Amino acid sequence: MTENNGLGPSLLRVQDLETFFTLRKWGFLRVGEVRAVDGVNFDLREGEAVSIVGESGCGKSTLAKTILGLQQPTGGSVHFGDQVLDTSDRRQMDWYRAQVGYIQQDPYGALPPFMTVRRILEEPMIINGVKSSSERWQRMEKALTELKMTPVEEFLHKFPHQLSGGQQQRVVIARAKILDPQLIVSDEPVSMLDPSVRVEILELLRLLQRDYHVAVVYITHDLSTVRYFSERIFVMYGGQLIEKGLVEEILRNAKHPYTMALLEAISDPDPENVNTFKKVPGGEPPSLANPPAGCRFHPRCPYRIDGTCDQKPPPEFTMTEQHRVSCWLYGDAS
Amino acid sequence: MAQDNGMFRVQDLYLSFGTKRGVVQAVDHVSFAMPKGQTMVLVGESGCGKTSLGRALLRLLPRNVQSYEGSVYLNGTDLMQLSEERFRRDVRWKQAALVPQAAMNSLNPVLRIVDQVTEPLETSGSRKQWAQARQRAEEVFQLVGVPLDFLERYPFELSGGMRQRVILAMALITDPELIVLDEPTSALDLLTQANIMNVLKRIKQEKGFTFILITHDIATSSELADLAGIMYAGQLVEFSDAYSLFTEPLHPYSQKLMASVPTLKEDKTLEFLPGQPPSLLQPPEGCRFAERCPQKFAKCSQEPPAIDVKQGHQVKCWLYERGDKRDRK
């Protein structure tokens, strides 16, 4: 509970979380494992929005699925409120799934093509015992109005393929929040949308988070949208969270060489860019089946300390109360 | 058209597809001109016809083309007048090459990289010796920053970023004057993306290729742009030098689009566009953006011409008629 500054009760606590996938040969011989999530710790307060930023293949979607209970962790634990999640406990999972909403990346793939918007939104309520149909109607109307899908009657009997990408994503958001969850996990909610629509969806999500005091875990590869969305950023690389901190702190004063490289790599629309080259490290993200020893970033790191970075994995060093970095540059190796 | 030398010019290019539901006007009377050795970026949202325009320039069209008109001048010759055979032999790859979207996934998995990269040299009738072709392949590999021993490998042994570089090398190998890049970095990771942009920038500065970069990513496009065009619903709504377009966009759509780009370094309030682009099946009469435009007025029900606001800056919007309404609001 060290990261909880007394700003609110802790809602979600992830402790030493590990999700490994076994690699098999001929279907039964174990030949290794993919360490998709490897020792992740964080704490989320009620009503707080955090972003998890990382490149493709860094394990961020697996982390989301593990938090949602869609994936059994191989080690560590997820605490929700005062409970420890156990994916094999059906009853607890049924309860848990009403407490968390999930916004998927591809809205078209996430909506069943044979159901109308009305059925899509009604189904979670029927399953979770909202018996009165007038209450269901009220909730649907409220959710769609909040997401600016009006007139509501017009949308309710449409099928997903009759909606535009932005509207589909709104239906996904409406479905995620229709049971008034305490936590929403959104996995790249806007990466499939056009830039002019993107901002609107992010703003709607932000409004929901503020108005209903829902905690949001926003997973993205796009650092530039993060500042418009969350209070804290966790940077993920090779299955681990390597830097955690407040948004402004990370954007202005990033400490980990990987975060610095990410910030350098992002362009702002500026005609002066034509004349400058970006200083970014080459190389590729590590394979999670066979991660490098020591710090996972060391093969690409320009500030590598030989003999330390390639041998011992760095622990988390505290820069300020809110800002933590896993990098040997900021601590003593001995 | 002797004065056209040193320019690449497109005039009234029109491309439509016949579908079961009607005629789709993918590229609607697009005109622009650019000096050689410069880079133009073509920005637009999905479905605005930017890829169709890129393919139309190289006459790489699907079968359901309904009409394909206009002129494309390269070195003073109208490429549209050439026969299919001559276009194939003299223009495609030799003078102009296209790097299609997600091309890195289209490498043949059972052929070595070197066999694929040198293929344009042989098929374009250059009749170079094998050794020469290989030497040329080594040159372009050095240019795009791929280790030479990758020539002997197979595509699955390469990472996404390396495959994208190989594709780029393949487009460069015949030394074309014009290269059309369709979303060259959109499927790649951030750091890889920045690396590829660095490569493109270096090639552009050192070798003076003419690039047309098609993208939806405005922020990244500013890395390479000398000239910029904004497309909306099949039309080029604004075309100018990159500096004016990025600092002071004129068309209401360009303004909104620029305002929707999140920035890291400066704080700004993001704006968004309500509504969605019109269907290209039955585009609305008059200005196609009118329905979503915050500055719409009576005249917008007629189609605006491309108005020259100043030298080399064209806007397809009635607001700039006679240049007297340049001070917006």
Image: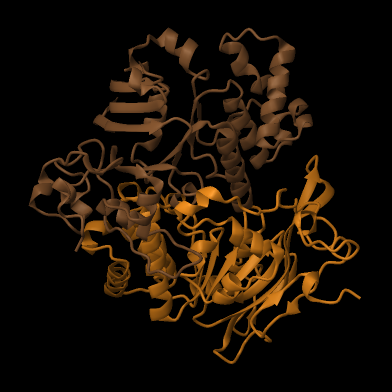
For chain A, the rendered hue is orange
Q: Quadrant of the C terminus of chain A?
A: bottom right
Residue in the picture at 29% in, 71% down: A133
In the orientation shown, which residue stands out farthest toward the front?
A: B3
Residue A169 lies in quadrant: bottom left
Relative to residue A23, is residue B304 drawn left or right? left
For chain B, the rendered hue is brown
Residue B110, visible in the rendered structure: no
Relative to residue B20, is residue A210 drawn left or right? right
**Percent coordinates x, y for residue A156 in the rendering:** 27, 59
**Percent coordinates x, y for residue A122 in the rendering:** 36, 64
Residue in the picture at 66% in, 79% down: A323
**Percent coordinates x, y for residue A170 in the rendering:** 37, 61
Residue A60 lies in quadrant: bottom right
Residue in the picture at 76% in, 78% down: A317
Is B151 placed above or below B48 here? above
- How is the protein colored in the picture? by chain
**Percent coordinates x, y for residue B80 in the rendering:** 34, 17
In front: B51, or A274?
Answer: A274
Q: How many marks?
A: 0
Residue A52 lies in quadrant: bottom right
